[in-house]
Image (spheres, grey):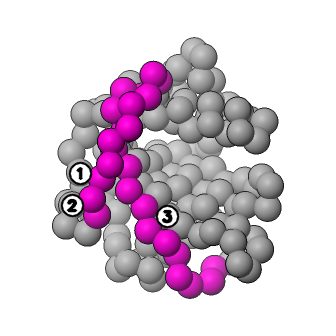
Amino acid sequence: MTYTVDFQDVSTTGLETSPVAEALAGLRANEARYFRNKYDHVFTVEPADDATDVVDRVHAILLKERDLVIAARPLEATAFEVDGIHWSYVFYEDGLAINVLYTLEDSGKRAVGFKLSDGMEVPEELADKFKFARQKSKLAGTIRGSFFVIKGTYDV
């Protein structure tokens, strides 16, 4: 079942099993606010079990680009296109959120972003490979984030 993320009345719907559910809900709402304000796009998610194509695509890019396998269980995922950019998101039970920004134009930007919910530890598989910068969010507290540029070409 698809869930429309509300960034004014933040809810843990779909994220209840996360030990940092409130912070992860704030992070998800922060993303929803960004897309509403920048692109006038309504951010919706669905259970990861119903979006296996999105989860599999994100995991394939991580494996091929950086030999990364995420240990946490995916809870929710979404994929959509706005302004010529294909976006994929996966939200994990441990509080991690991964997004793939993939500009459809050949010369465009393509990257994978990692965001850590307030209160979670850096996942072991990312700890030695990435440095995380901090940013403050009214919805999500302190978000730690990192990214890498995608070098390969993928079907989206």
Q: Position of residue 10 (x, y in %)?
A: 53, 20
Relative horizontal placement of residue 135, taking residue 40 as reference (left or right): left
The residues bearing labels 1 and 3 have C-alpha atoms spaced at a distance of 16 Å
Q: Secondary structure at mark 3?
A: strand
Q: Which residue is label 3 attached to?
A: 112
User: Could one spot residue 60 in this view of the protein?
Assistant: yes
Q: Position of residue 50 (x, y in %)?
A: 61, 51
Quadrant containing the C terminus in the rendered view: bottom right
What residue lies at 27% left-to-right and 59% top-to-bottom? 131
The residues bearing labels 2 and 1 have C-alpha atoms spaced at a distance of 6 Å
Q: Which residue is label 2 attached to?
A: 127
Q: Position of residue 41 (x, y in %)?
A: 76, 39
Quadrant containing the N terminus in the rendered view: top right
What residue lies at 72% left-to-right and 53% top-to-bottom? 80
Circle nearer the N terminus (2, 1): 1
* Image marks 2 and 1: residues in contact by CB distance under 8 Å: yes
Q: Which residue is label 1 attached to?
A: 122
- Inspect the magenta stretch and tell me whether residue 147 lies in it: yes
The residues bearing labels 2 and 3 have C-alpha atoms spaced at a distance of 16 Å
Q: Amino acid at mark 2?
A: Ala
User: Could one spot residue 51 in this view of the protein?
Assistant: no
Q: Amino acid at mark 1?
A: Val
Relative horizontal placement of residue 61, taking residue 19 as reference (left or right): right
Q: Amino acid at mark 3?
A: Val
The magenta-colored residue range is 130-154
Q: Secondary structure at mark 2?
A: helix
Quarter of the image where one finds residue 34: top right
Q: Between 141 and 53, which is closer to the camera in this rendering?
A: 141
Q: Position of residue 77 (x, y in %)?
A: 57, 50
